[in-house]
Image (cartoon, helix red, strand yellow):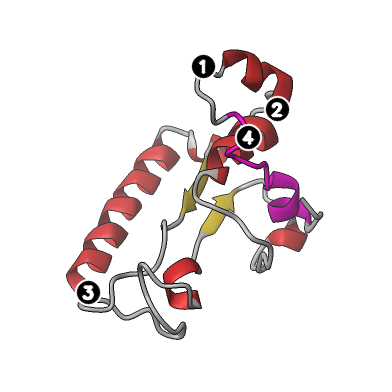
Amino acid sequence: SLCLCLSLCLSLTTCLYALQDAEMLKNCIISFTSDNGGPLDHANNFPHRGGKHGFYEGGVRTQAFVWWSQLPQAAVGSTYAGLAHVADWRATYAMGVAGITATAIASLEQAPFQDESKDHWAALTAGAPH
């Protein structure tokens, strides 16, 4: 897993420098997240107990982060204690970042999952409840 982390770090650094050289970094929002904890037969979810397919924190709580050059200073280094799902990034980016209304999203949706994603942008950037 150290090799995977190093590879990710090098790849991310390459991307960030490319965006900076193209003067595009100031317009980017970068986030990383995971869908759930790793399986216990070959993963360590420390400091959380349990893992994938379980209901302890190690199976449902994961780490994530958001970086944006315009992130309000009050949000820099903060921790979001609310509940979120990986599917929530869709609404968070569409509504919170791009400003697309819920009505506009609903009119574009063909699937029966229109309410599967919740916008967390205000909570992530200003500590507002969602």
The residue nearer to you, when weighing 46 against 41, is: 41
Q: Position of residue 61 (x, y in %)?
A: 50, 69
- Kind of residue at badge 3: Leu
Q: Earlier in the sequence, mark 2 or mark 1?
A: 2
- Kind of residue at badge 4: Asp
Quick one: label 2, few (<14), some, or many (20+) residues within 10 Å?
few
- Identify the mark at residue 110; answer none if there is no mark: 1
The correct choice, above or below, for 16 with respect to 84 in the image is above
The residue carrying mark 3 is 2
The residue carrying mark 4 is 115
| Quarter in which the N terminus is drawn | bottom left
Residue span colored magenta: 114-126
Q: How far apart are marks 2 and 1 (CA)?
A: 20 Å
Residue reaching furthest right? Answer: 128
Q: Which of marks 3 and 1 is nearer the N terminus?
A: 3
Q: Is residue 123 magenta?
A: yes
Q: Earlier in the sequence, mark 2 or mark 4?
A: 2
Q: Where is residue 52 in the image (x, y as percent from the top left)?
A: 35, 68
Q: Is residue 11 magenta?
A: no
- Kind of residue at badge 2: Gly
Helix, strand or loop at label 3? It is helix
The correct choice, above or below, for 65 with respect to 81 in the image is above
The residue nearer to you, when weighing 51 against 3, is: 51
Residue reaching furthest top? Answer: 107
Q: Earlier in the sequence, mark 4 or mark 3?
A: 3
Q: Position of residue 77 (x, y in %)?
A: 64, 68
**Which mark's residue is nearer the viewer, 4 or 3?**
4
Helix, strand or loop at label 4? It is loop
